[in-house]
Amino acid sequence: MHRLLAAAATLGTVWGAASDLALGARYCTLRPAVAGCDVIVRETSWLTIGGGEAYTVGRTGIAWRTSGSWTVDDGYRPVAEGNYLLEWGHADGSLTVGGTATDPVLDGGVIGIDCS
């Protein structure tokens, strides 16, 4: 049983690393952050399409689930280029990801951020 679990964990790690390498994944922590909550973004690019996912990291230090995702034309990486706005309210936040005239955000440009 232990070998099966070890094999499954190894396979999952290799699969995730291969996916990041193949898609040229880049990670960044967004600012401004609030106490007890960080927003981590993973952006990828493949041929003529780009995309990203936003994850919240709370007090545990683990990103349990994605807050949302977006798709961008021509492999543009808007967050890496600084083309985003992260705003915080009393209990949650909002991430707006922007494109350009030639590389628009095709899907999911506004994402709700919940750190609860």
Image: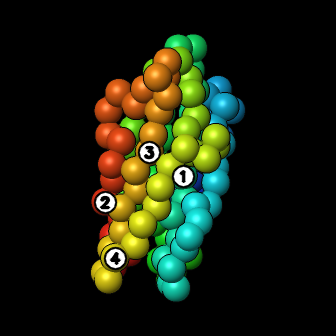
Tell me the tag on residue 89: 4
The amino acid on which the numbered mark 3 sits, given as a three-letter code, is: Val
Which of disc 1 and disc 2 is earlier in sequence?
Answer: 1
State the CA–CA distance, disc 3 to disc 1.
Answer: 11 Å
Check disc 2 and report its element: helix, strand or loop.
Answer: strand
In the picture as drawn, the residue positioned furthest to the top comes out as: 47
Q: What residue is disc 3 on? A: 97
| Residue 28 image-quadrant placement | bottom right
Check disc 1 and report its element: helix, strand or loop.
Answer: strand
Which of disc 3 and disc 4 is earlier in sequence?
Answer: 4
Please provide percent x and percent y for residue 45. 58, 26
Tell me the tag on residue 41: 1
State the CA–CA distance, disc 4 to disc 3.
Answer: 17 Å
| Residue at horizontal 47 percent and vertical 55 percent from the top | 85
Check disc 3 and report its element: helix, strand or loop.
Answer: strand
| Residue at horizontal 54 percent and vertical 73 percent from the top | 33
State the CA–CA distance, disc 2 to disc 1.
Answer: 13 Å
Residue 76, above or below 113: above
Decide: few, some or many residues near mark 3? Use Cα within 10 Å; few <14, some 14-19, many ≥20: many
State the CA–CA distance, disc 3 to disc 2.
Answer: 11 Å
Q: Are marks 2 and 1 in contact (CB under 8 Å)?
A: no
Residue 12 visible in the shown view? no
State the CA–CA distance, disc 4 to disc 1.
Answer: 20 Å
Which of disc 2 and disc 4 is earlier in sequence?
Answer: 4
Q: Nearer the viewer, mark 4 or mark 1?
A: 4
| Residue at horizontal 58 percent and vertical 61 percent from the top | 30
The amino acid on which the numbered mark 1 sits, given as a three-letter code, is: Val
Please provide percent x and percent y for residue 108. 32, 40
The amino acid on which the numbered mark 2 sits, given as a three-letter code, is: Gly
Q: Nearer the viewer, mark 2 or mark 1?
A: 2
Decide: few, some or many residues near mark 4? Use Cα within 10 Å; few <14, some 14-19, many ≥20: few
Q: What residue is disc 2 on? A: 112
